[in-house]
Image (tube, rainbow, N blue to C red):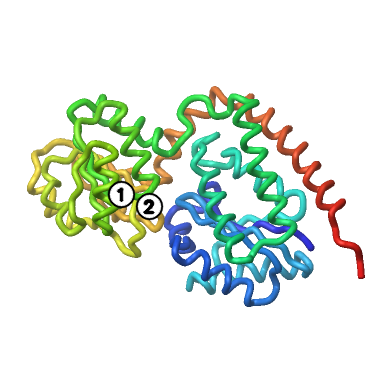
Amino acid sequence: MTPLVLGLSHHTAPVEIRERFAFAESDVAPALTRLRQRGFISEAVLLSTCNRVELYAVSPRPVVETLPALREFLAIDRQQVMPPPEGIYSHAGPQGFEHLFRVACGLDSLVLGETEILGQLKKAYDLALAGGHTGRVLNKAFQRAFSVAKKIRSETGIQRGNTSVASVAVDLAERIFDGLKNRDVMVIGAGEMSEKTARALLSRGARSLFVSNRSHDRAVTLAAELGGKAIHFDEWEHEFPRIDIVISSTSAPHYVLDRPRLERLLRTRSSRSLLLIDIAVPRDIDPAVKNMEGVFLADVDDLQAVAEEHLRGRREEVIRCEALIREQVTILLSGLAGSRPPSA
C-alpha cells in the first residue's frame, strides 16, 4: 500500500488553471465516491481550496499505474483536458507524508505559516472519514499532521506577524487607500474567508460593512456578528455607489461581477477609487475589469506579491520547521510499519 499525493497549487498553476479543477464543497463527498468506485484507490482525501486542489490516496497498485490514473480522474471528473504537466505535482511514500505535513503547517501556503489551511485540511479529512474513504494509513497520517501543526505553532516562530490571506488583503487595501478610515466595505458571499477578511478590515479602521449572500439568513447572522447591515443578494447593487472595497467569495460557477455590469455600476459613483478583492476559486470577478480606470482588482494570485514581503522575517524558522517535519515523518513511518496486520 503506497501513500500518494497528486495536485496543483498556486506554486505550479495560475488561478485560471486552478479554478477549472476546483471542487465545490458540496461535490467533494460525491467525488470521493466516484474516485473509489474506479477501483484503483483504497483510501482517499480530497482537498480543494482557493490555492490548491490535492488528492491524498493509498493504492495497492504500483505508483507508475496509480499516478496517471489519478491524473486522468481529475481531468475527467472536472470535464477538462489534462492539466498541463508543469502544473501537476505528485509525491509518493515518505515524500507524500512530508508534503501533507508541510501543507498542514502552512509551509506550502501563499502566506507562510497561515493557519486557515489547517482548518480546511481537517474539514477535508473529516468529510472523507465520515464517508468511509479513509483507512489505517491516511487516518494515522492526518492525525499526525494535525499534531505536527500544533507542535510547530507552539515551538517555532513561523506564525508571527501577518499569517493569513485576510491580513494580506487588508495590507493591500491600506496601501491603496493610505489607511482605511472612512472606508465602506461590502462582502459578497458570507463564507469563512470573507468573514475573516471583513473582520480584519474592520479591525484596521473601516467605517461600515454590508453583507450580501445567497442565503440571506447567513448574511443576517454575519452582519449581526460584525455590526454591519445585511442585504438581499439581488439588491446589493443599490448600495454600490457608497462602497470603497468589495470582498467577493461565492461558490458561483460564473462571474458575479463582469465588465459590462461594473461599467454600469461605476456610473452611479463619484470618481473615487474602488478595490475589488476576489478570493473565490473559480473567480467571481471578470479579470477584464483590471483595465478600468480607478478600479483595482486583486485575486488570490495577486496577493502573492504582498505575501512575499512577509517571508523575510521567518525564513530561519522554516529551517527549524522542515527539520521537525522530517523527524515526525520518520516517527509516522515507524508507527505504520509496526502496526501492519499479520500476513494471511
Marks 2,1: beta carbons within 8 A? yes
- Residue pictured at 26% horizontal, 26% vertical: 205
Amino acid type of the residue tagged 1 in the rendering: Ser
Q: Position of residue 184 (x, y in %)?
A: 19, 36
**SS label for mark 1:** strand
Q: Work out whether 41 lies above or below 261.
A: below
Q: Position of residue 150 (x, y in %)?
A: 62, 35
- Residue pictured at 54% horizontal, 74% vertical: 76
The residue wearing badge 2 is 280
Amino acid type of the residue tagged 2 in the rendering: Ala
Q: Is residue 44 left or right of residue 50?
A: right
The N terminus is located in which quarter? bottom right
Precedes in sequence: disc 2 or disc 1 = 1
The residue wearing badge 1 is 248
- Residue pictured at 53% horizontal, 69% vertical: 31
Q: Position of residue 34 (x, y in %)?
A: 57, 74
- Between the C-alphas of marks 2 and 1, the distance is 7 Å
Q: Is residue 22 left or right of residue 133?
A: left
Q: Position of residue 341 (x, y in %)?
A: 86, 61
**SS label for mark 2:** loop
